[in-house]
Amino acid sequence: MSSKKQKSIRDHKDYQSEVERLEFTKEYIKSVLEMSKGNKELFVENLKEAFADLDTSDSSLSYMNLLTNAQYLELAVSELERLSSVIGKPYFSRINFTSSGDTNEEILYIGKASLFDRVNQIPIIVDWRSPIANVYYDGRLGNVTYEAYGETQSGYLSLKRQYDIENGLLKDIRDIDLTTHDELLQKSLAGKADNRLTEIVATIQNEQNEVIRASLKHPIIVQGAAGSGKTTIALHRISYFLYSSGYRFPPEKLMILAPNKLFIDYISAVLPDLGVNKIKQTTYIEFMRNCLGKKLTLISPNSKLMALINGNEKSKMIQWVSSYKGSLDFKELIDHYLKEIEYNLAPSEDFMIEKSRLMRGAKLKKLFINEFQYLPIYKRLDKIKNLLANDLRLKKLLILSKLNSKYDDALEKLLFSSRPESEKRKEKVVNFMDSKEKRISSVEKESKVAIKNYMAAFVKKDIFTLYKELMSSPELLQKYSRTLSEADSKRISNYCQRIFAKKALELEDLAPLFYMKAKLEGIEEPYKMKSIFIDEAQDYSYFQFAALKEGFETDLFTIVGDLAQGIHSYRGLNSWEPLVKDIFPNANYQTLQKSYRTTVEIMQLANEILSIMDKDLPKVEPVIRHGDKPRFTKIDPANLEQIRAILEHDIQLLKKEELNSIAIIGRTDKECTRIHKMLENSKLPIQLLEEKEDMKKGSIVILPSYLSKGLEFDAVLILTLEESYREEELDIKLLYVAMTRPMHRLYLYASAPSELLLNRVMDHGTVHIGDNRKYCAQKDTTSEF
Ligand SMILES: Nc1ncnc2c1ncn2[C@@H]1O[C@H](COP(=O)(O)OP(=O)(O)OP(=O)(O)O)[C@@H](O)[C@H]1O
């Protein structure tokens, strides 16, 4: 820190008291940590004793003792972890607040974990997720309100103060008014990307705060521009959720669905910081693979995307079928199919034992269709089976006793009505006894197999078999659909048959399979999530959302995405409206138009590229942070050596500026392989990134545009060797995604500006033309436009 700044912080009127407060807080944390360590040791000892007691006696008291000590130990450990992680920076801000009707001004320090005075319970640090902390994010100085436990509280906010604390030392104090509000944000945005997302609790903006704290009892759908903080705030919302509603269910019941493994790696570092590391983090495909419980061979969605990028007749077909399979029309078709399966499985025969009817078929049918409707269809059969078993157990005795008394009565009548010595009478009695024995034995015998025999009529077909039967048959498709023409049905079934012949499925088949599993078998408990967070939601189809909602039987979804980055929009999602209208009618819908990632200059170019597309997409507003204009350098694709020299030179300069996280983005996998080959012998630490890989620290990564989605780098170099971007929606979106990845620098390389669609925006002066003469000893390829 400069001496000028040192001086200015010491000049602050409260400097001394703030330093003392910080020292007091650190000391207090240390004493609590000491106590927790002591507690931990004590509980470990107690646990050992409780275990020993269990060996000698199995009284429930020693078992309770064991459980209690295990719980205390867990609490002590989590307290230790929580406080150890914040001791270097116990809080980041402070508010002075006077509740309405009160004269006492409260001074509240806000941090990532709460801490209370053990004696008087006065807060020493208030958690950023607590209701009162909302005032810091939401309120201007003056009269403010906040919600706590369903009630609106009001008061007067007289001070908002931010701190820079590093390694336990106070580095800066800023009192927030309208003019200084942005300083901390600017400082944090000017930082460097480290291939990892970070927490932003100190600088959450008002519009973001609204998303984080939006009602947890309702779904929320957020359309947010590139870099508007969607991923970051989705993670902060999880943290808020666990703090405010965590008692409702354990973190294992919360799930983040991320687009790929790379992305999970990218977000994973921030999760412990936010105290949410125990939640399930997975990709849609991985989740489905586990939940559907079968080894699935999937046609790679990326190879499909590649086929679409390369665009030919086949790709039109792929696009059409994918979009149909993601539609709510297709869901309706599956619903009709399931209805028929349900009706075919509904019992209609009477349940009989010997000659007695135990339950009418009509009654069983009613139970199956109406009463047990809340259960998945196959589970209803299990229920019917149990019901019949119970009924049989009770009624069997009744049948037997009825039989006994019927024969006994008849025998008695016979004995009274005829002469004892008559041969005929003797014969009749013997026949009676025989018949009685036969019928009783028949009841006994039949009751052993009656249920098995009755249930044998209901075959629970495997969902994969059912699905394949449906999709391979144009007749069935036609039968259950209201919208498909005969020709369409044929096209779909031909397409599916080709895939099934390879013993494979495609991503679009997972939603209907999951949906059918939910309706027929039910989703098993370990996979039944209670709250779901979906990032890059623009890449999901309507059917995917509907299937997830019905399968989990909850609408507690946090859905964040950006239609402008919808490179998988062929699957169906082109607007949020049907999602809100037809699938999540209770949802709150919010938009975030401000972008925090990149500079004004880079965002301006990205916006212009986006507007080439004839779509009504809102312009992104960058947070005012200036940087270099994006730079275009003309290259000669025939001269790979020269291109390598240019890239090496630029990367060295970026590194000198400590812009260390650098990506080279190519249009497709193929183009990236070419780039990698070209740079193979370079001295730079190059990594050709694959979807399942982690980014190696310090390496320059080469990755295709579609894979860069969601990620962020200090600098991005977009390079075209053999593949140019065409003026089509998919290519424009891919280019837009790539252009919105850098925080600080964007360099573009191509044989001509038109290869990167820059010819369409060149006149606007948003791109700086790089001088590449210095690299061109043999050939002059200076760019001129
Ligand atoms: N309030 C904030 N304070 C500081 N940094 C912020 C804030 N909001 C967002 N950022 C930063 O902006 C960058 C972009 O955030 P994030 O990746 O969450 O955006 P996104 O909307 O998911 O982007 P994209 O759709 O392009 O993937 C991150 O570096 C994040 O830390």
Image: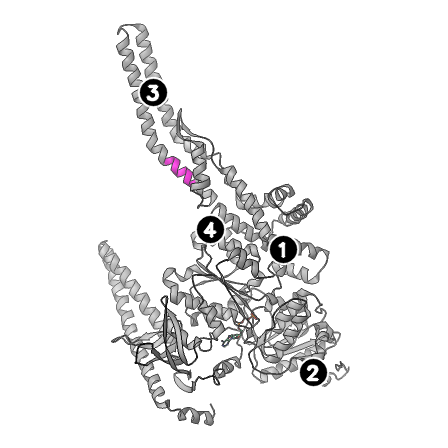
Residue span colored magenta: 382-389
Residue underneath mark 1: 323
Q: Nearer the viewer, mark 3 or mark 2?
A: 2
Residue underneath mark 2: 770
Q: Nearer the viewer, mark 1 or mark 3?
A: 1
Along the horizontal axis of the image, is 590 left or right of 736? left
* Mark 3 / mark 2, whichever is N-terminal: 3
Mark 3: which amino acid? Glu
Question: Which part of the image, by quadrant, shows the C terminus?
Answer: bottom right
* Mark 4 / mark 2, whichever is N-terminal: 4
Between residue 559 and residue 506, name the one nearer to us: 559
Q: Nearer the viewer, mark 4 or mark 3?
A: 4
**Callout 4–callout 2 Cβ contact below 8 Å:** no
**SS of the residue at dot 1?**
helix
**Callout 2–callout 1 Cβ contact below 8 Å:** no
Mark 2: which amino acid? Gly
* Mark 2 / mark 1, whichever is N-terminal: 1
Q: CA distance from mark 2 to mark 1?
A: 42 Å
Answer few, some or many: residues within 10 Å of disc 3's Cα (few below 14, many 20 plus, some between 14 and 19). some
Q: Nearer the viewer, mark 4 or mark 1?
A: 1
Q: Residue at x 59, y 61 (%)?
A: 575
x and y, in percent, of residue 267 in the image: 50, 69
Q: Which image quarter: residue 470?
A: top right
Residue underneath mark 4: 523
Residue 386 in the magenta stretch? The answer is yes
**SS of the residue at dot 3?**
helix
Q: CA distance from mark 3 to mark 2?
A: 104 Å
